[in-house]
């Protein structure tokens, strides 16, 4: 007779206690160490970076603070439970023990994002069905709605948003269910719309960069707002505006809502208090000049309109002029930019002169200045005639890029 196998009783016992959160701040590839440093400055001393993000522990007020103040995170999720499940009846039993009512009020809608790798339970639709049944059993009137087939923070699409000043969190609460090596982790998204959606960027120019990438460039270049900043290819002004918001200490989430504002266990007072505290920290003006330029009149208009919505119109100057006409304020300072780069080999030829001019501007007019730029092509970098040090590797619109820095 074969020895009987011990029965496995899955339990979400590793879930944090009510009122405490095991949080995970999602980061774009390459931004993890910068995000860890940022979260530590926000008071999360246990923040620890690993591939894809940063783990940290917090209470409700800390969760609010992370969402409101992080300039680099894509979203913040909290773990509700973690358990092993080898069969669907084990999944069903464990899912019923998850405290769904912490994040979902009666009658609320929700959506599920399910992934399964190297697990006996691998059919995502069947997993979602069991989890959904557990949610609707626990929360009266809860209803599941369909979500996008591909979550936007997993997409290489950088199509700009045009959401105006107010960015509202999607009405359906997102739960993330992940199976890996037969262990299921259930998390709740606390952010709603991705955190790069600050709310100010309504007018856009060609090939805009995400606000989180702009903030990462500034962090990688060690921008501290004490010296002048110039962007000679400012486009719709994202780098300028992110710099001005940093200089003014304006919380990036000031104009938007978050999914966790609807959580039953997080009182509205926590959000009111956090927003009041954030407003009290805002400085009246930037300490040093912040200047942008673009040869395209539409880009200049877009940058000015976005700066107005962000509340920093008085802190930035945006001029219509070509790169060759760049003028730098009295330095030293930071010349930071996302210059055009050709994805196809045939597009790179006309850009060689542009990069050569950029290098000449720094050498001839930027003594004591630093140049930090986003680069996708080492050959084009070479045409600047400058010696660069690499500060960051990440991607932009699905293209591998580097933040590099040279001294004038």
Image (cartoon, rainbow, N blue to C red):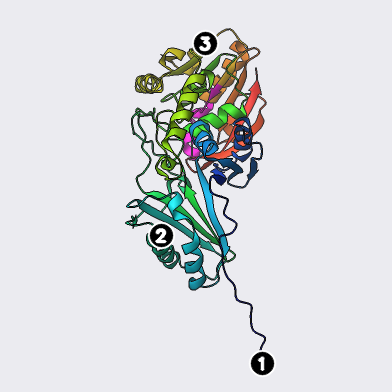
Comparing 171 with 54, the one in front is 171
Category of crowding for the residue at label 2, using alpha-carbon neighbours closer than 10 angstroms: few (below 14), some (14–19), many (at least 20): some
Kindly identify which numbered label has been placed on residue 138: 2
Count neighbours of disc 1 (C-alpha within 10 A) and say few if under 14, some if 14 to 19, many if 20 or more.
few
What residue is shown at x 63% (from left), y 26% (from top)?
405
Q: Which residue is drawn at 42% across and 52% down?
A: 150
Cβ–Cβ under 8 Å for marks 1 and 3: no
Disc 1 or 3, which lies upstream in sequence? Answer: 1
Q: Name the residue under label 1.
A: 1
Q: How would you rate the neighbour count of disc 3 (Cα within 10 Å): few for under 14, some for 14-19, many for 20 or more?
A: some
User: Residue 324 at x, y = what percent?
Assistant: 50, 15
Nearest the eye: 304 or 116: 116
* Mark nearer the viewer, 1 or 2: 2
Asked if one can make out residue 209 in the rendered structure from this viewpoint, the answer is no
Image: 255 above or below 313: below
The answer to whether residue 81 is seen in the rendering is: yes
Relative image position of residue 316 (x, y in whole percent): 45, 15
Circle 2 — which element? helix
Query: Does 19 appear in magenta?
Result: no
- First in sequence, mark 1 or 2: give its number: 1
Q: Secondary structure under badge 1?
A: loop
Is residue 55 positioned above or below 184 on the image? above
Asked if labels 2 and 1 touch by Cβ distance under 8 angstroms, the answer is no
Q: In which quarter of the image is the C terminus?
A: top right
Which residue has dot 3 on it?
Answer: 327
CA distance for labels 2 and 3: 63 Å
Give the magenta-colored segment's residue range: 336-353
Q: What is the spatial separation of the Cα atoms under label 1 and label 3, in whole angstroms?
A: 87 Å
In this view, which residue lies farthest toward the top?
330
């Amino acid at each position: 007779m074969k020895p009987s196998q011990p029965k496995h009783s899955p339990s979400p016992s590793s879930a944090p206690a009510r009122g405490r959160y095991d949080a995970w701040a999602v980061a774009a590839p390459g931004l993890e160490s910068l995000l860890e440093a940022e979260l530590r400055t926000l008071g999360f001393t246990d923040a620890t970076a690993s591939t894809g993000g940063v783990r940290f522990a917090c209470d409700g007020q800390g969760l609010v603070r992370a969402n409101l103040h992080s300039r680099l995170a894509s979203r913040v999720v909290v773990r509700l439970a973690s358990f092993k499940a080898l069969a669907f009846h084990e999944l069903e039993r464990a899912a019923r023990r998850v405290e769904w009512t912490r994040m979902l009020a009666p009658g609320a809608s929700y959506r599920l994002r399910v992934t399964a790798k190297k697990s006996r339970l691998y059919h995502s639709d069947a997993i979602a069905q069991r989890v959904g049944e557990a949610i609707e059993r626990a929360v009266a009137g809860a209803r599941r709605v369909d979500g996008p087939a591909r979550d936007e923070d997993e997409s290489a699409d950088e199509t700009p948003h045009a959401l105006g000043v107010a960015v509202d969190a999607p009405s359906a609460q997102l739960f993330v269910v992940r199976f890996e090596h037969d262990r299921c982790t259930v998390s709740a998204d606390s952010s709603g719309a991705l955190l790069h959606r600050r709310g100010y960027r309504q007018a856009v120019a060609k090939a805009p960069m995400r606000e989180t990438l702009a903030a990462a460039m500034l962090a990688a270049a060690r921008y501290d707002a004490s010296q002048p900043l110039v962007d000679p290819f400012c486009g719709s002004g994202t780098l300028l505006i992110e710099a001005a918001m940093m200089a003014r200490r304006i919380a990036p989430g000031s104009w938007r809502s978050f999914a966790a504002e609807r959580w039953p266990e997080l009182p509205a007072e926590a959000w009111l208090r956090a927003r009041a505290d954030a407003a009290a920290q805002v400085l009246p003006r930037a300490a040093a000049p912040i200047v942008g330029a673009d040869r395209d009149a539409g880009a200049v208009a877009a940058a000015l309109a976005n700066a107005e919505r962000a509340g920093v119109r008085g802190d930035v100057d945006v001029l219509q002029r070509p790169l060759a006409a760049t003028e730098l304020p009295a330095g030293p300072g930071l010349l930071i930019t996302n210059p055009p780069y050709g994805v196809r080999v045939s597009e790179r030829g006309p850009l060689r002169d542009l990069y050569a001019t950029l290098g000449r501007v720094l050498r001839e007019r930027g003594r004591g200045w630093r140049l930090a730029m986003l680069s996708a092509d080492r050959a084009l970098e070479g045409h600047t005639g400058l010696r660069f040090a690499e500060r960051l590797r990440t991607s932009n619109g699905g293209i591998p890029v580097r933040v590099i820095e040279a001294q004038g």
